[in-house]
Image (cartoon, rainbow, N blue to C red):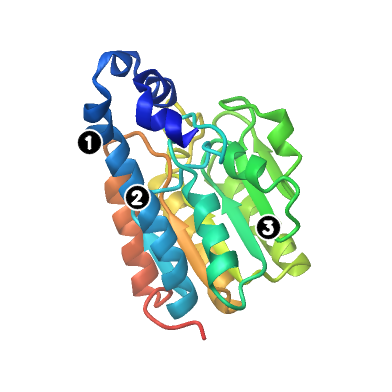
Amino acid sequence: FLEGLQEWSFIVATITEILPVAFLPNFIIQRKVLRPFRTQTGGTIMAGKLAIDRGWAINVGGGFHHCSSEQGGGFCAYADITLAIKFLFDRVEGVSKAMIIDLDAHQGNGHERDFMDDNRVYIMDVFNRYIYPGDGFAKRAIKWKIELDWDTEDSEYLQKVETQMSKALQEVTPDIIVYNAGTDILDGDQLGGLAISPQGIIKRDQAVFQAARTRKIPILMVTSGGYQRSTARIIADSILNLHHLQLIDQKVL
């Protein structure tokens, strides 16, 4: 798969769903498309180590949850979540269990396929049941699954996330939480199909960080999908809220 990215522009065109990319020379693809993906992937791996060292880390990027070790898709060219977790398992002493909390609007079928038979990784996924990727095989890897309907709003969404997350963390205590914090749940996002307000996203992020911090579990956040102009401002406001609540300026351990 990685060799194909280096050699064939049409593979990148398929992943990005931008067909004219197939006709560009591959050296341009490497510089303008894949290098930024690789930079974000490296950021996720680095953030995983930082989360273990200081209790939390945020990569303002990454979250390529449709890419597995064998193929890309859905704008995702590198499996950064898989790589970060495997790096921690292989290189960091004391990390033997991980939980992925995937709250992007889409099912995280990439990491689900990668960790299908790996009992060290516990996956919670909350997603719109009607949209891409609809990967029934990958769903078998989800330990805690919430499939949402079109136009789900704040109250229902937050109640389901908080209840399911609490149940999940009662069943297992991971050594790290990888939180895929997609903002494509925002009302008006045509790819996400949900109806969560900006304040709902901020409350969601707060709930996940509070769950991790009160249990003294290191947490790595990646920002994943989000396709509206307001997305960056909402992410910034959410991070400021976490800082204001002192959820990201104190060590866990």
> Do the numbered discs 2 and 1 sit on residues whose CB atoms are within 8 Å?
no
Marks 3/2: CA distance? Answer: 22 Å
Determine which of the numbered discs, if any, sits on residue 121 in the image.
3
At horizontal 25% and vertical 18% (from top left) the residue drawn is 24
Marks 2/1: CA distance? Answer: 14 Å
Inspect the image, locate mark 1, and give the three-letter code of the amino acid beneath it: Arg
Inspect the image, locate mark 2, and give the three-letter code of the amino acid beneath it: Gln
Please tell me whether mark 1 or mark 3 is closer to you in this view: 1
The residue closer to the viewer here, 29 or 244, is 29
Image location (x, y in percent) of residue 9: 34, 21
Q: Is residue 225 above or below residue 4?
A: below
Mark 3: secondary structure: strand
Image location (x, y in percent) of residue 169: 70, 66
Mark 2: secondary structure: helix
Marks 1/3: CA distance? Answer: 33 Å
Q: Which residue is mark 1?
A: 31
Inspect the image, locate mark 3, and give the three-letter code of the amino acid beneath it: Val
Determine which of the numbered discs, if any, sits on residue 125 in the image.
none
Q: Which residue is mark 2?
A: 40
Q: Residues within 10 Å of mark 1 (few under 14, many from 20)?
A: few
Q: Is residue 244 visible to us here? A: yes
Mark 1: secondary structure: helix
Which of the marked residues, 2 or 1, is nearer the chain's N terminus?
1
At horizontal 54% and vertical 40% (from top left) the residue drawn is 153
Which of the marked residues, 3 or 2, is nearer the chain's N terminus?
2
Image location (x, y in percent) of residue 240: 31, 65
Q: Is residue 20 above or below residue 202?
A: above
